[in-house]
Image (cartoon, helix red, strand yellow):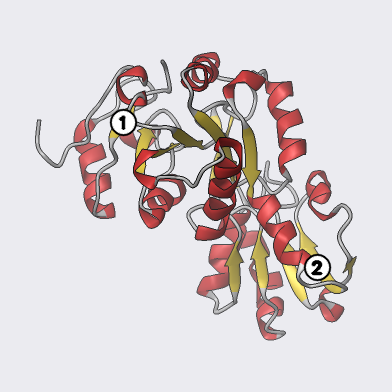
Amino acid sequence: MDARTPRLIEHFSTLATSYDIVLSDVWGVVHNGVAAYPEAGEALARFRAGGGTVVLVSNSPRPGEPVKRQLDHFGVIREAYDGVVTSGDVTRGVLSERPGANVLHIGPQRDLSIFDGLDIHFTTLAAADCVVCSGLFDDEVETAEDYRDLLGQLRARRLPMICANPDVVVERGDRLVYCAGAIADLYATMGGEVLYAGKPHRPIYDLALKECAARRGAPCDLTRVLAIGDSVRTDFKGALAIGVDCLFVTAGIHAEELGGHDRPDLAALAAMFAEAGELPAAIMRRLVW
């Protein structure tokens, strides 16, 4: 195998003993937006049974507790994780430091739990102090381009945007839908100021590691931390940014460009990671113990 080709493994158990902590992505790793991947939940549960700590790190624009209920609905077992940290949690922390803020919300009503209990006021574009983008109003049919005119108006007012979900796309069943990150990226290219609350940016990892340290009763040794995810843009680059290893799952959002869900193209993987400039610790088709 070429030295630049990622190591393909079939079982997480061959890697697990090298780590004490797993920071696992959610969509594309433990579920597909419709139903759980049972083998992934079992793998994480077995890692925990061996003394490991698992915190799910999600770019969900909702706080951790509603995400846990969503995981229950999809069939993800509670034994698979110790805690959940989301970009919604980070967004709430940012907004709590802006009491009384006038907020323009871009996103569906299902994300409104992100604002529960906060001292903020929903308002119009003309009166807003800042924008919180949690998603598209209708991600079944819309793309970021549908928001270009609105973003131009935000830019004219120099309104800062808090992106509560930096994912550009996410799996929903057997297809991909656009997320808040697509709108935020477009706003940034137009010269808008964007604060990304989730992966691959540092704040969400700091919160997740703080959770791990509290649960283990000791500071986290980063050499013993493994990030698991299916996105180069968020999971892999986020792991690199904080200096931890990454286990990359190929049957997620990159599946089609990598040759399909079941037979990843190693040459395509090598090219993808060559562009990123680093290799993950290993790759797997799906997370299986």
Mark nearest the camera among 2 and 1 is 1
Q: Position of residue 276 (x, y in %)?
A: 28, 53
Q: Position of residue 152 (x, y in %)?
A: 66, 77
Query: What residue is drawn where x is 9% and y is 36%?
Result: 2
Residue type highlighted by circle 2:
Leu
Side of 75 where 244 appears, left or right: left
Give the secondary structure at mark 1: strand
Task: Please report contact status of discs 2 and 1: CB closer than 8 Å, yes or no.
Answer: no
Q: Position of residue 3 (x, y in %)?
A: 10, 39
Query: What residue is drawn where x is 60% and y is 37%?
Result: 215
Residue type highlighted by circle 1:
Ile
Query: What residue is drawn where x is 83% and y is 55%?
Result: 115
User: In which quadrant is the C terminus drawn?
Assistant: top left
Classify residue 141 by image quadrant: top right
Would residue 118 be visible to someone looking at this image?
A: yes
Classify residue 249 by image quadrant: top left
Camera-nearest residue between 166 and 23: 23
Name the residue beneath numbered marker 2. 104
How many marks can you see? 2
Would residue 177 be visible to someone looking at this image?
A: no
Q: Residues within 10 Å of mark 2 (few under 14, many from 20)?
A: many
Name the residue beneath numbered marker 1. 283
Side of 108 where 265 appears, left or right: left
Query: What residue is drawn where x is 46% and y is 35%?
Result: 21
The numbered mark, 2 or 1, whose residue comes first in the sequence reads 2
Camera-nearest residue between 18 and 32: 18
User: In which quadrant is the N terminus drawn?
Assistant: top left
**Disc 2 from disc 1: Cα separation:** 40 Å
Relative to 274, residue 192 above or below? below
Relative to 167, residue 159 above or below? below
